Amino acid sequence: MTVTVISKKLEFDEKKSRQKFLEKTQLRCSGRFRWNILIIIIILVFYALPFLLPLIGVFVLNAYFILLWALFAIINITRHFKIHFMTKKFRTKFSNIDTISENVDEKYQYLMATFAYKEPEEIILKCLRNIKSLNGSKNVIMAVCLEERTPNLKEKIASLSKEFEGQFKELIVTIHPYGVEGEIPGKCSNSNYGIRSIYNHLKEKNASFKPEKYILVNFDIDSIFHKNFLDVLKETVNKEKQPEQVVWQPLLYYNWNLDKLTFFTRIIGILRSKMMAAALVTFNINVMSVFCASLKLYVDGNFVHPFYQMDDIICFIRWNIVSKKSLKIKPIYSPTISGPTSGATWFEELKELVIQGKRWTIGSAEVFHYFMCKVNRMNGLDALLWGCNYLNYYCGFLCIHSLISISTTLRLLILEDDKENILSVLFLSFPIFLYILNGLMIIVNKMAVKSFLVDLQVVENIGIFRKLIHWILTIPTETFYTFITLYGFLSILIHGKKKFKLEFNIIFKQEKNLDLLKLKDNNSRLFWREISRFRNERKRINKSSKKTPIEDFSKFYEDLFSHNGKENTSSHESIRTDVDKHFENIKDEKFDPVFVLDDIGKILAKLKKNKPRSYDNLSNEF
């Protein structure tokens, strides 16, 4: 088996739909209410309520969120024990699970697809080595979806081919073209291209192809699966009567060297694990990082929206709307590691936490806007439940709870004269109760490390004093994360879609050399925008050239459309071949050397004015 590489531009059947979509993006905010405003209004109203309600009302409001914390804690513990028993079951039930996994009569064919852009080659190889180690991996179709602008693209594909040829049922590499009109660069557009390409490839290869017979595992490149993941997945999927109406979510843990990272990264990592298992899955809000679904659902749901970025958030609600099905999120009780935010230094970790937190918030806010614009296409009860659950979690739990705690404290300190009031005293029980729940959350995560994350080579060495410090800092860290969330909501409110696009295009804009030839083929508007940018930059430098050092002036024109340090693509090689062929065709041709004065006059008349002189020191005007 050789590696199948897919890089051709997709010829969409919905060309008219794409044009219609592009027209919509131009009018996205014209005459349409920005539903993100509703989120800010709700947050501000709830922040003000402790100053407006009687004290008993403020007590009930705070008690609601504490009870919500307690409910999430109970669900988290329940799911933890289910993972423990499921892992133990597959450890002891089969004496030779590899043989059983690979020889059983498969009801479905399993696909696993991961996505990468700038990730180092070692991370990609490590990911596929983990997939290779799974029981039953020989029967899996493995896909790695890369970007056309992935650094060292050919070398990475060669390494994948060399190490993993013959290790899977089929290994597919897709290369997402850069600058396709109607897309923003990122995970969604890459996922949309990659999964469409895989679907087309399988359909062309197999005459009896049926998408409902394929289950696709969509996961981030920094994920690590338990060796029994496929066995648990198969058992879970086979129990489902209508798999086209379910999206499965493996329960995630962020214990990737978590003991070596800062306290805020560890606390947020543990909190995210708890919230994903207890809130997002339980209340059917959205999947996260790693999720499984029938390929038929991708087809019915029109794959992935290429104009958004958070594919895990947008996919679930969009599939609900486009497929017109009432979808459910169900857990897969197999522990899966997902990489936490990280950095080389304390400051970089904090910066990355802020960037990621704001990014997730902006992505979720845009999905809420999308939902509100399309809500009339959903079943009324399903739409109401999802909208309420979304606001309860993303607005209420992540943002409003901490803000209400702050405004309640201010009221008690400033407006309440009777500090001995029984209700005022009872308010002190809320942070104590919250600390108890946070301590329980840390203990559950520690139990997970010892009982089943150890199978994923997770080892944590944290001293008792450091654990105590982390526990004390849980509430301050959660409050700080609330302000990151609020910052994200305010950013999307103030800047709108422009901010959303800017946040996710920034890593692409950092690259100076563009493949203009490919860009011209894929997106003519973006091509001419880049040409205009170069022209404006040239004017700016020309005007200030007297003050600009000659080295900077020279370097600008050397780098203008420079190809230095970049390997030739197939397009470049094609141009080189065409030029060489043209030269061979004309080199022996003889031209009539006779010309008259009128010929010279016609040529001179075509020369442009105000151009620099050449070696003869004669200007065109001369």
Image (cartoon, rainbow, N blue to C red):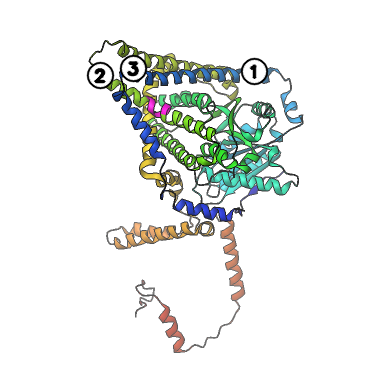
Please determine whether, in this image, residue 443 is positioned above or below residue 200.
Answer: above
Name the residue tied to disc 3. Answer: 56
Q: Report which residue position mark 2 lands on.
A: 413
Q: Relative to the observer, which residue lies in front, 291 or 43?
A: 43
Q: Residue at x 45, y 46 (%)?
A: 505
| Three-letter residue code for mark 1 | Lys
Q: Which of marks 2 and 1 is in front?
A: 2
Answer whether labels 3 and 1 touch (C-beta < 8 Å): no
Q: Mark 1 points at which residue?
A: 88
Task: Return the x and y of residue 379 as percentages of the image width and height.
Answer: 55, 36
Circles 3 and 2 in contact, beta carbons < 8 Å: no
Estimate the spatial distance between the alpha carbons at disc 3 and disc 1, rounded to whole Å. 48 Å
Q: Quadrant of the C terminus?
A: bottom left
Which residue is drawn at the image coordinates 32% and 13% (left, top)? 423
Instruction: Kindly state the secondary structure of the residue where label 3 is placed.
Output: helix
Of mark 2 and mark 1, the one earlier in the sequence is 1
Q: Which residue lies furthest to the front in this view?
A: 380
Residue 447 highlighted magenta (yes or no): no
Q: How many labels does the image show?
A: 3
